[in-house]
Amino acid sequence: MKLIAIDPPTRSFSRWLTNEEIARVVAHKRGWRQAPDGSILAGKIRKTRIADSLEYLGAAVVAHGWASRPRTEPSDSSGPTHIMWGIIDARTDAEIAEQLGEAV
């Protein structure tokens, strides 16, 4: 099974990122890869399944509060997305997989 590298989005953090774009940023930073079935895997030898898809991963990251968007109504999608790297970096891949398995 060949894993595909996940690249971060090309647009700026000065705008809200979609769930998929948030997942791309997190996955790229952690060095995770995407399997042909769309799932996200960590590790090169012993692979740990992190999430079923980029969309699911992004939604779970937001649900856990590891990324946030300002709450403004009506939304014009111009608020910044903020990712809490300290929270994400302090956890192992196995811990993240376990916590995300319970989310969303």
Image (tube, grey):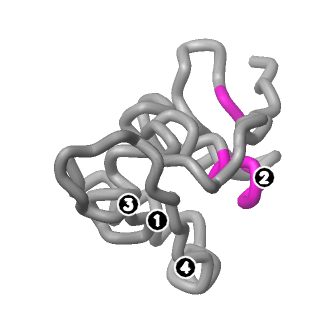
Which residue sits at x=55%, y=20%?
Answer: 38
Residue at point 37%, 36% (across, down): 56
Dot placed on the residue nearer the N-terminal end, 4 or 3: 3
Q: Quadrant of the N terminus?
A: top right
Disc 3 residue type? Arg
**Given the image, on which type of amino acid does mark 2 rest?**
Gly
Residues at discs 4 and 3 in contact (Cβ within 8 Å): no
Q: CA distance from mark 1 to mark 3?
A: 21 Å
- Earlier residue among tags 2 and 1: 2
* Disc 1 and disc 4 in contact, CB within 8 angstroms: yes
| Disc on the earlier residue, 1 or 4 | 4
Mark nearer the N terminus (4 vs 2):
2
Residue under numbered circle 2:
31
The residue identified by callout 4 is 91
SS for tag 1?
Answer: helix
Crowding at dot 2, Cα within 10 Å, few <14 / some 14-19 / many 20+, comes out as some
Find the distance from the CA under tag 4 to the CA under tag 2: 14 Å
Q: Secondary structure at mark 4?
A: loop
Between 63 and 34, which is closer to the camera in this rendering? 63
Disc 4 and disc 2 in contact, CB within 8 angstroms: no
Q: Quadrant of residue 92?
A: bottom right
In this rendering, would 43 be left or right of 39? right
Residue in the foreground of this view, choosing between 28 and 1: 28
Whether residue 64 sits left or right of residue 19 in the image: it is left
Counting residues from the N terminus, which is met first, the one under dot 3 or under dot 2?
2
Residues drawn in magenta: 25-34
Distance of mark 4 from mark 3, alpha carbons?
22 Å
Q: Which residue is mark 3?
A: 69
Secondary structure that dominates the magenta span: helix
Few, some or many residues within 10 Å of mark 4 (<14, 14–19, 20+): few
Q: Mark on residue 96?
A: 1
Residue type at tag 4 = Arg
